[in-house]
Image: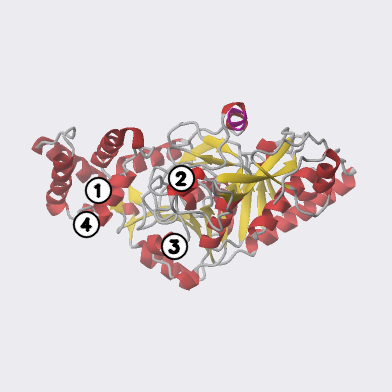
Amino acid sequence: MSLSTVNHAAAAAAAAAAGSGKSFSAAAPAAPSVRLPRTRAPAAAAVSAAAVGADRAADRVSALSQVSGVLGSQWGDEGKGKLVDVLAPRFDIVARCQGGANAGHTIYNSEGKKFALHLVPSGILHEGTLCVVGNGAVIHVPGFFNEIDGLESNGVNCNGRILVSDRAHLLFDLHQAVDGLREAELANSFIGTTKRGIGPCYSSKVTRNGLRVCDLRHMDTFGDKLDVLFKDAASRFEGFEYSKSMLREEVERYKRFAERLEPFIADTVHVLNESIQQKKKILVEGGQATMLDIDFGTYPFVTSSSPSAGGICTGLGIAPRCIGDLIGVVKAYTTRVGSGPFPTELFGEEGDLLRKSGMEFGTTTGRPRRCGWLDIVALKYCCEINGFSSLNLTKLDVLSGLPEVKLGVSYNQPDGQKLQSFPGDLDTLEQVQVKYEVLPGWQSDISSVRSYSELPLAAQRYVERIEELVGVPVHYIGVGPGRDALIYK
């Protein structure tokens, strides 16, 4: 495809028309800024639009299937927790199916108070919702209790509202120590993990020497099993210190934990399937995202579980035929934390501007996130893998004020040949040249907009172009962190 300079008038027309934006490579000249006027509707029309928006919101949520899911469709941190929190009142159960405290979901209650959740599902703020941590998750018991204590101290009742699978694996402090030792061993090739012990715990699970929650009911054999884990770590890492006194202290500690955890423990496979038979509604909350999936992500710079749709079945024990609507959550731009390829990454002032405007710092670690333009190639790949019925486009407000916005629409190899799919080979991925589509930006603040028709035309065109490129409708648009800062399209 030949390249040409963006014409100011053509760019403005593209914002208002339904046609496609013009395509340019990364080396193409930037488009001049385009400022589109925004008209305000009369008061009566505004009230009518608000009523229509409320009806659309109710219709969207009530139409979701009995078992629905909210999954990340980038490299995590897309804002899944907020959507789960918004949808939760219409569901009986909110369930986590994989991951551990490496997930960080920030949500706000009706008074605007901020809560940072890590393992507890985001439905916890709604009194009538049962929260389930499934067998596919890994449980750091001290961290789990700290999270519950924090919620209780802030007026959130957790009593009888959280169930933990008896099949879930236990994550010990030794797993966290091993995580740090492994990263240090990798030196310049480190993965960039949260050092929360997630990978080592899943490693114990796969090598079949891990301990599960149900083992807390058998403290007579608990110490022997834990001894195997300690010895394995000590034999593998010189920096890991181990003694029998450490083992005794840990066993005594977990005797106390076992007593407190007992009321939370359940056969969640039975609970969930019985709930399906009883026609109760279940919302699955994914942790991390598809681009961090152990199979489909940018391996080895991935998490250690399956945050894609398949993880729902294996992590909760729900049959595939029971799963209905899956909502993919995607930022209006792209971020990732840690190491690994990032084709649309922005450096220098542009990346800093997105990071500052979007407050892009990790909920779990506080690490600054890498920022870049929305990667349509990666998003389409995630849509194919998960079969999303709709998308939740978050943080659209962060792009306000930019003279132009870009979409990474295709990857080319160094010889100019277009790649037909998202590559699994990282050597290939690190060499791709991204071809961008340039669209005019919008100058007005959209954080108070609650109706799609009230968005600037350029913002509407941006949303609709994403829908055209990936073939999945955008039903939810985030324009701020609060519960109400959500447009139903």
Mark 2 or mark 4: which comes first in sequence? 2
Pointer 1 with pointer 2, Cβ within 8 A: no
Helix, strand or loop under label 1: helix
- Marks 4/3: CA–CA distance: 22 Å
* In-front residue for pair 353/172: 353
Can you see residue 322?
Answer: yes
Residue holding disc 1: 258
Residue 353 is covered by the magenta coloring: yes
Image point (40%, 40%), residue name: 147
Residue holding disc 4: 208
Q: Which residues are magenta?
A: 350-354
Mark 3 or mark 2: which comes first in sequence? 2
The nearer-to-camera label among 3 and 2 is 3
- Marks 2/4: CA–CA distance: 36 Å
Residue 335 % position (x, y): 54, 40
* In-front residue for pair 373/475: 373
- For the residue carrying disc 2, how many other residues have a C-alpha within 10 Å: few (<14), some (14-19), or many (20+)? some
Image point (85%, 46%), residue name: 13
The nearer-to-camera label among 1 and 2 is 1
Q: What is the three-letter code of the residue carrying label 4?
A: Arg
Q: What is the three-letter code of the residue carrying label 1?
A: Ala
Q: Is residue 265 depicted above or below 66 in this figure?
A: above
Residue 157 is labelled as 2
Pointer 4 with pointer 3, Cβ within 8 A: no
Q: Name which quarter of the figure residue 89 lies in.
A: bottom right
* In-front residue for pair 215/286: 286
- For the residue carrying disc 1, how many other residues have a C-alpha within 10 Å: few (<14), some (14-19), or many (20+)? many
